[in-house]
């Protein structure tokens, strides 16, 4: 098999070797239940406490504000449904049109239960109008949920500012931080964010573990009933190996974040410049200034994304597309549509998302391979005027 | 990831007959940008009336390119009468199969060929023996009742979902699913009984809470998908008696057609699904 050039890190990441080493003993020998009274199980509990501290350190909060879940989607569901059940007299949720389906689908489902959901739009660069969001807040609003960074374009939203708006009106603020954590500095202690969702597999921990940050004093109903685990806020025996892994992944992110993200940003900029200078009729989607350092979403006019991906796949290059053809639905990316990106350009969008494992050689390889692919597909396209 | 056959991958990686022909005898253009794919097909006949040269250009995914490419191979050397008999099923078989959600790619190929043949006859001042007519059923993707009857009969389809996979009809706002179900029944009626989807019954009398919930459900299921597909949105603000207060969001908020949409889409749907007494008012922020 040829080597894989993995540039789809906003979908999932490679588990770090150090993380695998850290979790392995808990898959083999240290299989005790942390709730047990014996030392064999109890020692596992201590390691979970350490993992909790490591996550809290990365987020800039207290360990008792960290709740382990099974994934980012569970964290989002818990945050939204748990908050609403605590404020039975408030029947409105304010969110954005560019949220991940974990939030958007959850909110739209609430409408079937008598809630009203207000979705704030974005401009052509994917930016939110904070004033418009502010106008939507009223006494009936239970919570606001706005993602920290968009998974498709990498656009970073001013969530700390939005959290202040919400706080001023006594409204709970949740942010889906799945793409932001580990990529940009986060210090929850200094913010008014009440709830934040994290996913393990987006930051080099395995799939199947997530985190929900719950600010001390935040009222939140229980989503998963069961035992006394997680201080009674989330039942179910702990996913011990993955929680240990999550702790280690956060420790690594804490240690390397500043240096790595500087390096990744430089690689991303090289990739972007290389593609834009060698392929005519393409442009970058998203907010150039406030953007994750690892993400580049590029629209190629006149050609369709799935075809580009399949030709890249020939060379082992992994990326993703906002084209309808890749999704099984007939609609292109809801994020690009909300930004008003024209249909062809939305169908022809490719997202490259880098990680700490991306190398200069890989960037150069993609810059070399992409232009012939684009040219070839444009020869096939009826929209290219010759 | 799609499970494409070797036939699809071979045609995608090595497409045949790409490009244009100078002074073609017939040109067919189908699909549109909003559908996410488009195909232009053109041919030239030899002295005996057989397809001597054929070329295509496609905007679309691997299966769209493969379907167009294999079709050009199939029809080369055929008379127009023979070519007109090629169905989307023939294209699929030649490729060794297509994923369900990609069946419309083969239909697009067959439609482009049909359009090119019709164009040939039009250029000569006549009409094609098999010119398709019919009225639009799916307004989102511009699919006619004739086209739906055809894919249903040729592929032995029995559900609305299958029809959507084959020709996209019903895949947008979903407002035409009822009509598609009727067409399936009409075609398959003699051969197979089709589960008829009953029109949602309007309750005779509603409590206030029931009315508000039904208004919200109707907005979510019947109205929002249409607006969202155009980059807009709508929010239910309040219901006062029979007055429904809504606000347009996104693209709709600036849209010049908003007033029309309000009466002809929002109010009409609410009257249809909830109560004839309802009327709608727009609230501007």
Image: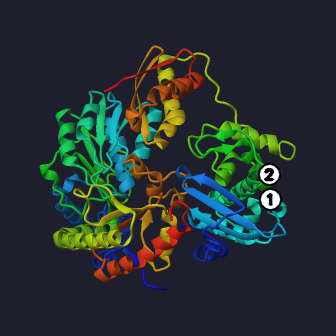
Q: Is residue B202 above or below residue A327?
A: above
Say which residue appears at 66% left-offset and 68% top-offset. B55
Say which residue appears at 56% left-offset and 61% top-offset. A382
* A184 vs A201, nearest the viewer: A184
**Where residue A351 appears, x then y in whole percent?**
39, 64
Q: Is residue A363 above or below residue B104?
A: below
Q: Which residue in the rendered view is the most extreme toward the bottom?
A: A1
Q: Is residue B44 above or below residue A345?
A: below
Q: Is residue B96 visible?
A: no
Q: Which residue in the rendered view is the most extreme toward the right?
A: B190
Mark 2 to mark 1: distance in Å?
10 Å
User: In this rendering, do the residues under marks 2 and 1 share a single chain?
Assistant: yes
Disc 2 vs disc 1: Cβ atoms closer than 8 Å? yes
Residue B48, image quadrant? bottom right
**Where residue B179 appears, x then y in whole percent?**
70, 37
Mark 2 — on which chain does it sit? B
Q: Which residue is mark 2?
A: B128
Q: Residue A102 has which mark?
A: none
Q: Is residue B167 visible?
A: yes
Residue B75, image quadrant? bottom right
What SS does tag 2 mark? Answer: loop
**Where residue B21 appears, x then y in whole percent?**
64, 67
What SS does tag 1 mark? Answer: loop
First in sequence, mark 2 or 1: give its number.
1
Q: For the residue carrying disc 1, how many other residues have a C-alpha within 10 Å: few (<14), some (14-19), or many (20+)?
A: some
* A298 vs A151, nearest the viewer: A298
Left or right placement of residue B121 versus residue B203 in this view: right
Q: Which residue is mark 1?
A: B84
């Amino acid at each position: 098999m040829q080597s894989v050039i993995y540039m789809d890190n906003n979908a999932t990441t490679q588990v770090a070797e150090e993380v695998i080493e850290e979790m392995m003993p808990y898959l083999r020998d240290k299989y005790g239940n942390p709730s047990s009274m014996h030392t064999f199980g109890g020692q596992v509990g201590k390691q979970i406490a350490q993992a909790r501290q490591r996550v809290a350190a990365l987020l800039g909060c207290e360990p008792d504000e960290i709740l382990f879940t099974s994934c980012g989607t569970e964290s989002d569901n818990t945050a939204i449904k748990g908050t609403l059940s605590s404020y039975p007299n408030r029947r409105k949720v304010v969110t954005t049109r560019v949220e991940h389906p974990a939030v958007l689908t959850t909110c739209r489902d609430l409408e079937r239960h008598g809630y009203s959901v207000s979705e704030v739009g974005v401009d052509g660069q994917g930016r939110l109008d904070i004033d418009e969001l502010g106008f939507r807040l009223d006494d009936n609003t239970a919570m606001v949920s706005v993602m920290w960074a968009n998974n498709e374009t990498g656009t970073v939203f001013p969530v700390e500012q939005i959290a202040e708006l919400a706080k001023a009106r006594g409204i709970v603020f949740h942010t889906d931080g799945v793409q932001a954590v580990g990529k940009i500095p986060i210090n929850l202690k200094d913010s008014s964010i009440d709830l934040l969702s994290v996913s393990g597999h987006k930051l080099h921990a395995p799939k199947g573990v997530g985190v929900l940050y719950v600010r001390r004093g935040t009222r939140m109903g229980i989503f998963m009933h069961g035992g006394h685990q997680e201080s009674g806020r989330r039942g179910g025996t702990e996913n011990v190996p993955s929680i240990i892994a999550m702790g280690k992944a956060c420790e690594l992110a804490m240690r390397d974040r500043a240096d790595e993200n500087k390096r990744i940003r430089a690689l991303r900029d090289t990739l972007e410049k290389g593609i834009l200078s060698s392929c005519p009729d393409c442009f970058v989607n998203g907010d150039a200034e406030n953007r994750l350092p690892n993400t580049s979403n590029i629209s190629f006019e006149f050609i369709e994304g799935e075809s580009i991906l399949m030709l890249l796949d020939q060379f082992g290059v992994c990326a993703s597309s906002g084209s309808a053809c890749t999704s099984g639905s007939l609609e292109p990316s809801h994020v690009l549509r909300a930004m008003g990106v024209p249909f062809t350009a939305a169908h022809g969008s490719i997202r490259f998302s880098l990680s700490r494992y991306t190398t200069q050689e890989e960037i150069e390889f993609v810059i070399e391979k992409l232009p012939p692919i684009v040219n070839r597909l444009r020869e096939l396209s009826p929209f290219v005027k010759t | 990831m799609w499970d494409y056959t070797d036939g699809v991958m071979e045609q995608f990686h090595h497409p045949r007959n790409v490009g244009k022909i100078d002074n073609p005898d017939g040109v067919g253009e189908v699909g549109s940008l909003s559908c996410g794919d488009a195909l232009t097909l053109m041919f030239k006949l030899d002295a005996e009336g057989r397809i001597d040269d054929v070329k295509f250009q496609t905007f679309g995914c691997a299966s769209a390119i493969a379907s167009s490419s294999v079709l050009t191979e199939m029809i080369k050397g055929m008379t127009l009468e023979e070519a007109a008999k090629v169905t989307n099923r023939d294209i699929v078989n030649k490729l060794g199969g297509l994923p369900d959600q990609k069946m419309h790619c083969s239909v697009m190929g067959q439609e482009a060929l049909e359009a090119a043949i019709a164009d040939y006859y039009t250029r000569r001042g006549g009409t094609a023996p098999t010119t398709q007519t019919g009225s639009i059923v799916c307004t989102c993707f511009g699919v006619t009742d004739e086209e739906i009857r055809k894919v249903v009969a040729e592929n032995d389809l029995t559900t609305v979902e299958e029809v959507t996979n084959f020709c996209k009809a019903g895949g947008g706002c979903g407002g035409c699913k009822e009509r598609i179900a009727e067409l399936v029944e009409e075609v398959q009626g003699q051969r197979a009984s089709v589960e008829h989807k009953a029109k949602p019954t309007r309750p005779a009398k509603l409590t206030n809470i029931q009315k508000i919930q039904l208004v919200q459900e109707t907005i979510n299921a019947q109205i929002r998908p249409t607006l969202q597909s155009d980059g807009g949105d709508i929010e239910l603000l309040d219901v006062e008696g029979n007055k429904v207060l809504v606000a347009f969001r996104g693209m709709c908020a600036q849209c010049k057609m908003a007033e029309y949409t309000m009466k002809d889409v929002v109010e009409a749907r609410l009257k249809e699904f909830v109560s004839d007494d309802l009327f709608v008012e727009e609230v501007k922020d």
